[in-house]
Image (cartoon, coloured by chain):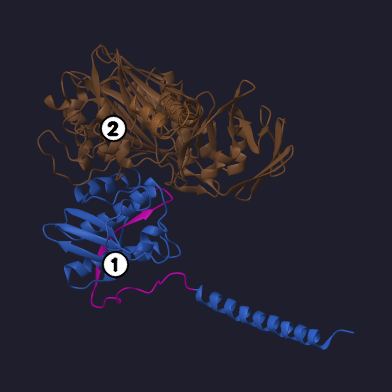
Chain colours: A brown, B blue
Amino acid sequence: MPWTRNIQSGENVSESAVEGASRPHVAAVAVVLLALIWALWLPGAPSEKHLSIYSTVANYSLPLVQREGRDYVGLLELFEPLGKVSAKSDSQRWRLRYNNVEADFQSGKTHAQVQGRDADLGGKFLLENGRGLVPVGSLGTLMPRVLGGPVTVHEESARVFIGSVATHFTASLTGDPPRLVLHFTAPVNPSVANEPGALRMTFAHEPLVAPASPTLTFGSKTIPSAIYSESNGMAILTVNASIPVMAAFGNDGRTITVSPAATPANATPNPATQNIPPGTTPAAATPPQPTQAAPATPAAASAGRRYFAIVDASHGGDDHGETLSTTLLEKDVTVALARSLRQELESRGITTLVLRDSDANLSVDQRAVFANADRAAIYIALHAASSGHGVRVYTSLLPIGDNDRGPFRSWSTAQHSSLQLSQSTASLVAGEIQKRQIPVRDLAAPLRPLNDVIGPAIAVEVAPQGSDVSQLTAPDYQQLVTSAVATAIAAARDQLGGAP
Amino acid sequence: MIPRHLKIGMVVLLLAALGLGVYAWQIRKTVTATAVVPTDTRPLAPPPTGPTERVVLFVAHDEDGTLRPESAQIPMPSGRQQRAEELLRALLSIYLDKSSPHVLGAGSEIRSVFLVDPGIAVIDLNAAFANTHRSGVLVEDLTVASLIHTISANTPGILKVQILVDGNERETLAGHADLSSYYDVSAVNQLAVQLQPGQ
């Protein structure tokens, strides 16, 4: 080899010396190669466990470590993105300071002191090289005390929701060929993967939460069901399909339409889903696209309608509604009423969706979109008030609007075609409430989203029978009202044109 | 024995503390004086003069959630638009009275009423009207029905009404009544019938 010859002839260097000089180079190359292999191999390795944290401040993910057969997380890195945090380690003792809250931990102990109060960790606190570790199961107790607010922990799936940050969704099947339309309360951008017989959407960064039932069935051979699951800090929605399907994003990432891959959505436009952007592309490479939302048409809504009552707890999140007393907000009473009404309706065999079952922000437009997309047989908005006595049942006081264009109906007067049915349903509800000796009135009101809902829609405003506002929180009074509403809806089932 | 410079220092500090105390007391007095008038309740327009006229105002009553016609003798200017404004101001004076059957917040005022052909009336409320309005479907429903039914019943030719707040569109009056669209006067008239006592 010329390289060997040169050394041997020109520089009088022994062979052993050459070998010695080349060894560091070989070692360096080997290290680099090993590092490369390691780096390339890592992503393919079994994914490590993660904890996802969702809050109004930040959404982030932390690695979990396995200790004593349980998942542990570092406390300092857990609180760091949420506020000012520091820690002091003193042999077996570890002190955490988050804003003005102090927590005291001892290595190997199963209890901690948060602001001087005892907190059960459900497992040992571990101190490793100055790093404080707690079991994931302890976060449900620990985090609310440190943060001073509600925290929901899904321990099995390692997901933590701080405050009211959850994203909800509804799913409905429309058109022929069938298309599954998913509406989300906040924009989402999942990774989408096609698998044999299914399309899997993985929500790694979104605080998506389960619908009322984790398995959604649609009664279609093409798209029979969708299954919601959670694991390793992620939410997964698997849409089962008998033929290849693809996903398309719309409405600023708030809508995902799953449709057969062979028949692009724009080939057979369906007025019921006009908020889906024209033109869909295969799922894996479809970014969210802004679109103009429009209500469904009556013709589309009546096609394949199934009986479905949507109960809407009005207000929520930043919108408190009326401040009923110093400690009672309308938004909280409406949620309690909605849950009670759902129970009453379902006990009468009426499938019911509660639109807001937490302290979430939902605009009136979003509420109407949900009601229209689900082709609800009846939409019931619930309100509470301190003034007046008893219950008021409202139907829409429609504004002036003559902007209908062909099959497209004006958003602000979408209720027009169903107003008569809404009024007759409201009369039935009022009659049933009257039977229970509760003062009741049947009125029109300029109350959104009643006028944006295409199907029958009513609002029920509950006030105390006397002057005691606390009656609004009394379960027996709530049940008296909701059972009357449910009885009337059940009686109007045939009139509303659906079957459970 | 306390050194002289320390004594001087103590005296200076005492004087400074006294001075600051007097200054703080003066500031407190000023703040209290300025906080006496939270809102400007002065009328936006001078009271009208001229012959009085009998009109019908549709007054909301919270106790039974009704809208009742009440006749009133009020001075009415000759201009159609000014007449509409005076009607609503007369209605508002009932609501702002101590014995109001439908209490509105202090400082509530009708800024102006615009009559635009064909048949459109625009009622411009001030911010205090909406910001201090009580929240609730019925209580807001009564206010809207009272304003629109009063103006349409006394001003022939009005077919639709829009309600603005401080010259701007607003989503709701106080969280419930929709202010984002024009009101159909015939629909509000039907609502007024529903809100009559005994209905």
In the figure, is residue B97 to the left or right of A266?
right
Secondary structure character of the magenta stretch overall: loop
- Examine the rendering and report whether any part of residue A467 can be seen: no
In the figure, is residue A441 to the left or right of B189?
right
Q: Nearer the viewer, residue A294 or B180?
A: A294
Residue A304 location (% of width, % of height): 22, 19
Say which quarter of the image contains residue A199: top left
Residue sitting at 71 percent across and 30 percent down? A110
Report the span colored magenta: B37-65
Instruction: List the residue tagged with mark 1.
Output: B111
Q: Is residue A279 magenta?
A: no
Q: What amino acid does circle 2 point to?
A: Thr
Instruction: List the residue tagged with mark 2.
Output: A255
- The crowding category of the residue bearing disc 1, from other C-alpha atoms within 10 Å (few below 14, some 14 to 19, many at least 20), is many
Residue A200 location (% of width, % of height): 34, 21
- Secondary element type, mark 1: strand
Tag 1, which chain?
B
Residue B173 location (% of width, % of height): 34, 53
State which mark lies toward you, 2 or 1.
2
